Each structure stands twice: as C-alpha cells, then as structure tokens.
Image: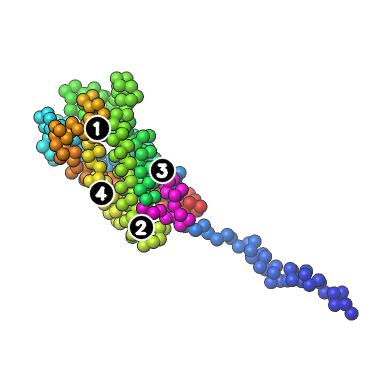
Amino acid sequence: MDPRRFGPPAEWASHHSPVRRFAAAAAVSSPSPPAKKTGRKHPGKAILAGGIAGGLEIMMTFPTEYVKTQLQLDERSAKPKYNGPINCVKVTVKEHGVLGLYRGLSSLLYGSIPKASVRFSVFEYLKNNMSDENGNLNKKQVLLAGLGAGVSEAILVVCPMETVKVKFIHDQTQPKPQYKGFFHGVKTIVKQEGLRGTYQGLTPTILKQGSNQAIRFFVYTSLKKYFQDGDNTVDIGNLRTFCIGGIAGATSVFGNTPIDVVKTRMQGLDAHKYKNTWDVITKIAKNEGFKAFYKGTTPRLGRVCFDVAIVFTLYENVMKLLDWAYPTPNWQ
C-alpha cells in the first residue's frame, strides 16, 4: 500500500507543520528591533534648540559684552575714559542709567538666535556625516566640525550683526548719538556705507568664530566623552554639562582674544583709521604694545564662560524635550 495515499506530501508537511506556521506568524507579527542609538542629533531640531538657547543666553550675559567692547574701544593712544571693568560699569550707570549697560542688545539679540541655530545645526550636520556607525568622531573630525560651524555662523550672521552692535555701543560715547534704534541704525549704516558697511572685519570675524567653535566643541566634546566613559548616549547631567561648557568657553577666550580685539577695532566708528586686518595688528602693536591685544579679557572671560556653559546646557535640555515630543529614532 502506498503511504502517500494516506497523508500529505512530505514537502507539504515540512512547510506547513504547526511549528513552522507558528514561527512564520511570529516573524510577521513581531515588531522590528528598535533603532540603535548613536548619540546623533537631528539637524532640524538643532536649528530650533540652538535658537532658543542663544536667545536666552544673550539676555543673561549682555552687560559683560557691553563692558568688554567699551574697554576694547577705549584706545590707549587717546585719553582713557575707563580704568577697568568696574569703573566702566560705574561710569555707564552714572551717565546712562542701568539700561545703558544694555545699549546694543537688540542688534545682538536679533543675531544671537540665528547664530546659535546655524552653529549647532551645521555642527550636527557635519558630525553626522563624518561620524562612524556608532556616532563617534575622532579629534580631527571634531575640530573640523567645530571650525565649519564657526565659519558658517561668521559669514551668515555674526559679522553683520557684530558690526552693527559695535557701532551702536561706540555711538553712545559720542556727544550726539546718531542711532535711534536697531532698524534706524542698520538703515543709517547701509545708507552711509552701503551693505559693505555691515561686513567690516569679515576676515578677523571668520578667524575668531572659526577658532572659537573649533576650540569650544573640541574641549566640550572631549570632556563629555570622558564622563560618558565610551557610551555617547549617556546623559552626563546638567551640572557636568554646565561645568565642561564653562571650561570650553575659558579655553577659547585665552586662545583668540587678540583676534577679537582686532575685529572690534575694525568694526567700530573709527574703522576708517585702518586699511585692513594687518594694519590693525601693526598699529596696535606699535602704539599700544602687546598687552593691548588682551584688553577686555577679564569681562570677556566672565561673559564667555557663563555664555558657553549656559548655552550648551540649554541646548542639551531643549534637544531632550524635542526628542521626547518629536521622536526621530533614525537619528538617535
């Protein structure tokens, strides 16, 4: 008797056995494994998170920026008006009131939001494109990503906004200030000097911002990686984030304050006294000495340390909130 008459074919039995059918159903119904977290951040979210962090930060730290700029403009070749940061604050408050320390805030505020947006989004974009499958970067790649972020923000936002801010602050020291507000100031500058008037000091601004962000992201990323102990998805907490952000800011101050001084001189109302970047450098060295390249270091150090610390802390927390509200698993 042929056994095949009393049962299904062997092939059919093997493919349709209860075990095989259960396995097939489980394979179809079971969810796909979650995406592997790599510590990457979505550039689109970085635009929003950076803008929010930048706006909040500048409102907290602007008075120190004002004092720094005033000291840098107070050239030693003329009779100094201030004998230090504290004296600058006292004189300003006496002559213009407490709000005098916020002169020029509007121009910097309008620039800080897009500046931080460009900075963090470009950094995240470059980081995502250069990192390995686990989201890790080597030291050279971190420097390049930070440099790219700094150069981008310098050209797109920082140079025109910083020029307007410096002119506003310097205008306050004149017997008859000519700028009545942000938009009036921009209109006046463009009318008198053309669009080029808002791009004075572009070269030192690129050098300043490029070196700034290269140093800051390098130091911040290196210290963060140390505390994460090899796992770049670990949250190191707000206190550590704030502290390593402050260290990153301090490092950048000592690294490029001379560039900041040159940039400020080229953007002030006395910019016509200089032919180019090199001319500023030679005249400062000849007329004021080497120490002049570090004028305003103390107030800048206080501002930048807090600036970088708070902006990194705010940025990380806003990114957490955005990741919670709008998950993007393929980027994490």
Where 172 falls versus 138 (above or below)? above
Cα distance in 3D space between marks 1 and 3: 30 Å
What residue occupies the far bottom of the structure in this picture?
1
Say which amino acid is labelled 4: Thr
Q: Which residue is mark 2?
A: 225
Where 74 falls versus 300 (above or below)? above
Q: Say which quadrant the N terminus sits in.
A: bottom right
Q: How far across and down, in percent of the image, does residue 277 sit?
A: 26, 32
Say which amino acid is labelled 2: Lys
Q: How far across and down, in percent of the image, does residue 260 sit?
A: 25, 38
- Tell me if I can see residue 97 in this picture: no
Residue 251, which numbered label?
4
The reply to whether the C-beta atoms of the residues labelled 2 and 4 are less than 8 Å apart is no
Which contiguous range is marked in magenta?
Answer: 122-139
Badge 2 or badge 4: first in the primary sequence: 2
Cα distance in 3D space between marks 2 and 4: 17 Å
Question: In the image, is residue 94 part of the stretch drawn in magenta?
Answer: no
Residue 278, which numbered label?
1
Residue 122, which numbered label?
3
Residue 166, which numbered label?
none
Cα distance in 3D space between marks 2 and 3: 20 Å
Say which amino acid is labelled 1: Trp
The reply to whether the C-beta atoms of the residues labelled 2 and 3 are less than 8 Å apart is no
Badge 4 or badge 1: first in the primary sequence: 4
Badge 4 or badge 3: first in the primary sequence: 3
Of 67 and 231, nearer the camera is 231
Displayed quadrant of residue 183: top left
